Amino acid sequence: MAGLAKAGPTGRPYQPPTDSNQRNKGADLPRWTTGVTLAGMKTPTRACLVLMAALAFVAARGAEIKAPPLATWTLKGPLPTTPQRLDETLPLSDQTNRSGWTRVEAFWDEFNGTALDNNKWARGLDWWTGRQPAWFNPSNVTVQGGELRLAMRRDTPPAGLVRQGYTNYSSAALHSVARAGYGYYEIRSQAMGSAGSSAFWFQVEETPGWLTEIDVFELCGRGAVQERVYNMNAHVFRAAGVEGHWDNHAEWAAPWRWADGWHVFGFEWGAEELRWYVDGVLLHTQANTHWHNPLFLIFDSETMPEWFGMPVDADLPSTFRIDYVRAWKKRGP
Ligand SMILES: [Ca+2]
């Protein structure tokens, strides 16, 4: 988390909850916890309780909720030899299908048509209008040239969004119609070449008392350091027995700029473990303690002034490109 100190705990800076559409993204929720209990007090007096509560409040203001000690592993250094593609119907990381993957049509899309398949994808996010100053303009999501394209550009928001604080930029978002769960998800993609994030993530906003998010990646297209960093994250905003928001962040330093070329990104969502892959190579693993509810598969681009910096006009419009999405589940019940 230290690498994100300037940006807020998840890279998604806190924004006051004046706009309900902003409320559930990343670090939009302040993070603190009491960290002090009254356990062990046999005969607490009222005065003592008041004092303890006051001390707890003071302690809480300087503390933040830490991710529990999950079992994690992250690759250090360059990728080892990447696997060769032999079979387009299997994950690049498992070309001999040792795990017994079977194709899932609900998410599989080569984007080789001339329009977005509305049976599989929905433009925008019903629960969020975009990270200010950019708003999600549905027209920035297109399918052409065999690719799904998400554009970021100079743009004028509708008057209602201007009143909410959106200005001068638009970006793009879409999500799957179906809910994703345990399985393997692979895309071939190139990050947009401007500051701001190109993101592949999972979330949904409809389960009462439960809100989790998995960020397969949040990539910065241009920035002194971040343009080479692979950012991975798993968030818990609300869940039974969980107080406040915490997240488990990992990053890998690539030898290339993410906007300079195409790469294959894989995510294996297992009941016991979450696994991130780049170009068919395992990059990061984390125990799956909370990510069991089905979530939408989401692509978006966001302005991120505090984490990735604002784009310069010379880099706009910029385009987050996705050649395909492929998905599998394991055979069996
Ligand atoms: Ca394609």
Image: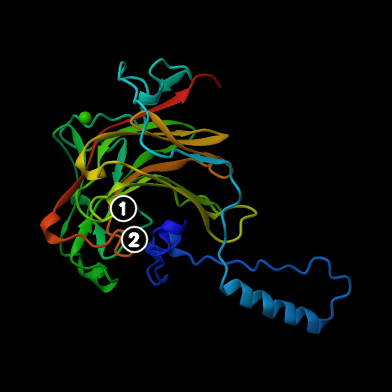
Q: Is residue 13 left or right of residue 290?
A: left
Which residue occupies 58% across, 41% down?
Answer: 71
Residue 220 is at least partly visible in this image: yes
Q: Nearer the viewer, residue 202 or 58?
A: 58
Mark 2, residue position: 307
Percent of width and height locating residue 221: 24, 50
Q: Secondary structure at mark 2?
A: loop
Q: Which mark is residue 85?
A: none
Residue type of the residue flagged with mark 1 = Gln
Q: Quadrant of ligand 1?
A: top left
- Of discs 2 and 1, which sits in the foreground? 1
Whether pointer 2 and pointer 1 mark residues with C-beta atoms closer than 8 Å, the reply is yes
Percent of width and height locating residue 272: 58, 34
Q: Secondary structure at mark 1?
A: helix
Q: Is residue 105 left or right of residue 211?
A: left
Which residue occupies 73% across, 77% down?
Answer: 52
**Residue that sits furthest to the bottom in the current view:** 47
Q: Which mark is residue 226?
A: 1
Which of pointers 2 and 1 lies earlier in the amino acid sequence?
1
Q: Quadrant of residue 95?
A: top left
* Mark 2 and mark 1: Cα distance apart in space: 9 Å
Q: Is residue 124 above or below residue 329?
A: below
Q: Nearer the viewer, residue 97 or 284?
A: 284
Q: Quadrant of residue 323?
A: top left
**Residue that sits furthest to the right in the current view:** 43
Percent of width and height locating residue 232: 42, 46
Residue type of the residue flagged with mark 2 = Trp
Q: Is residue 132 left or right of residue 55?
A: left
Q: Quadrant of residue 180?
A: top left
Q: Is residue 85 above or below residue 253?
A: above
Which residue occupies 63% across, 52% down?
Answer: 240
